[in-house]
């Protein structure tokens, strides 16, 4: 026959006991800590006592007043009574809680002297403040997409990812994770996601994919920044950046020859794209050609060169007319070679005369002797890395080569 020892009623849990489960929840993220909590006996000497025994480095708080339920505990606390500290394997349990040892018959637990009361003080808040000693966090100074041309301030495009590397050293449990987010979003400044969310929590170095969502409004450039915080402490901040798209990657192709009685030449199609992959995002961008003649002989010597002005970048493509007139003037030997580069201006980032990436082309005209006193006229346009009026760009793609005409 087993003797049951009546469990004395305990006082209601203090605020610190009620808040403490967040400690176990936080520590539970580490497999190492979780394993030690469930596979090793939890003793008073392991967590510190009033006699001044030191706690191991990972346990800096008094856990004695935290209710712990072990998977081996089956006894039920009578309704209305406070739950005591109990475990089928624990030493130093508080009070005389009966423990089921597997046979289904309650037996008295050893009667042990209660642990000394914890020193008086305010409840321990949760989550616990982040211990910042030793941690170092870095973010890129410049948040800048690889597609950003020289001369533009820091920016990333909307719709596509810009990958940035962040560094974390010196992190250890029970530190809070480092939270990365975009500061300054909204109010016309633009907005962006981090790995598809509003923030990213990390405990080690890694990469984050930034994606612009709302583009920066004109006059609001440079008000976004990537920040890193641990709790409320600011650990790192990038310089300012914007969300805007830029035109890039020009291409050309032949549309038709110009063969009317008064002129000769060709019409080429100039096309470009947005680095956001959506041409409509260029609604605050305009583009313009730059032409520099490097060779002009024969009928082209002393000829006047005209260029087009600013055009809306949302057009995506435009017919480029290369026209020589009057036609009869080109019945002579000669050539003309001109470099063509495209530039743009962007109201969102308040810049102008920025060289467009991969927009270089060479336009070549030439007249050669034909048969029976005639002359052959040839014109072509080919993507080439060139400089025009001080603007240098890598080659556009494609070519436009008109059939030979007799003049």
Image (cartoon, helix red, strand yellow):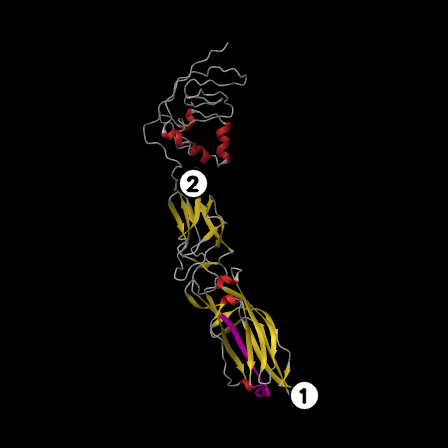
Tell me the crowding category of disc 2: few under 14, some 14 to 19, or many 20 or more residues within 10 angstroms, Cα based: many
* Cα distance between the residues tagged 2 and 1: 85 Å
Say which element carries label 2.
loop
As drawn, the label of residue 371 is: 1
Say which element carries label 1.
loop
What residue is shown at x 60% (from left), y 73% (from top)?
A: 255
Where residue 78 appears, as percent x and y from the top left, is 44, 19
Task: Answer above or below: position of 366 versus 356.
Answer: below
Q: Nearer the viewer, mark 2 or mark 1?
A: 1
What residue is shown at x 42% (from left), y 66% (from top)?
A: 351
Task: Answer above or below: position of 150 versus 233.
Answer: below
Q: Quadrant of residue 256?
A: bottom right
Where residue 292 appears, as percent x and y from the top left, is 50, 77
User: Residue tagged by mark 2?
Assistant: 176
- Quadrant including the C terminus: bottom right
Where residue 375 appears, as percent x and y from the top left, is 63, 86
Q: Is residue 356 in view from this perspective? A: no
Query: Is 192 colored magenta in this rendering?
Result: no
> Which sits earlier in the primary sequence, circle 2 or circle 1?
2
Where residue 68 appears, as percent x and y from the top left, is 45, 27
Q: Is residue 197 in view from this perspective? A: yes
Report the magenta residues as a range.
326-342
Q: Are marks 2 and 1 in contact (CB under 8 Å)?
A: no
């Amino acid at each position: 026959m087993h003797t049951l020892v009546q469990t004395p009623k305990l006082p209601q849990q203090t605020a610190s006991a009620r808040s403490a489960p967040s400690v176990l929840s936080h520590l539970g993220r580490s497999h190492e800590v979780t394993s030690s909590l469930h596979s090793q006996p939890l003793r008073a000497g392991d967590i510190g006592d009033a006699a001044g025994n030191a706690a191991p480095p990972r346990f800096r708080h008094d856990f004695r007043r935290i209710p712990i339920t072990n998977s081996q505990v089956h006894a039920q606390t009578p309704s209305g009574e406070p739950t005591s500290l109990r475990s089928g394997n624990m030493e130093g349990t508080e009070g005389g809680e009966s423990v089921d040892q597997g046979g289904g018959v309650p037996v008295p637990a050893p009667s042990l002297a209660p642990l000394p009361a914890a020193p008086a003080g305010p409840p321990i808040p949760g989550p616990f403040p982040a211990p910042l000693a030793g941690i170092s966090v870095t973010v890129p100074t410049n948040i800048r997409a690889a597609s950003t041309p020289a001369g533009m301030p820091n920016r990333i495009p909307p719709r596509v990812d810009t990958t940035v590397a962040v560094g974390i050293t010196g992190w250890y449990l029970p530190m809070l994770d480092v939270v990365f987010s975009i500061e300054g979003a909204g109010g016309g400044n633009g907005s962006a996601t981090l790995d598809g969310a509003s923030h990213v929590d990390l405990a080690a170095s890694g990469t984050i994919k930034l994606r612009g969502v709302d583009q920066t409004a004109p006059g609001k450039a440079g008000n976004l920044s990537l920040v890193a915080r641990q709790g409320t402490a600011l650990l790192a901040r990038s310089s300012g950046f914007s969300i805007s798209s830029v035109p890039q990657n020009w291409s050309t192709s032949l549309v038709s020859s110009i063969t009317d009685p008064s002129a000769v030449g060709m019409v080429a199609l100039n096309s470009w794209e947005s680095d956001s992959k959506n041409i409509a995002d260029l609604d605050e961008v305009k583009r313009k050609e730059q032409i520099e003649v490097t060779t002009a002989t024969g009928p082209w010597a002393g000829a006047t060169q005209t260029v087009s002005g600013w055009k809306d970048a949302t057009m995506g493509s435009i017919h480029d007319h290369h026209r020589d007139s009057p036609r009869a003037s080109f019945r002579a030997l000669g050539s003309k070679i001109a470099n063509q580069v495209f530039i743009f201006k962007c109201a969102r980032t308040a810049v102008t005369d920025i060289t467009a990436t991969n927009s270089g082309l060479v336009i070549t005209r030439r007249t050669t002797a034909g048969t029976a006193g005639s002359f052959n006229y040839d014109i072509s346009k080919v993507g080439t890395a060139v400089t025009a009026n001080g603007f240098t760009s890598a080659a556009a793609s494609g070519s436009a080569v008109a059939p030979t005409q007799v003049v």
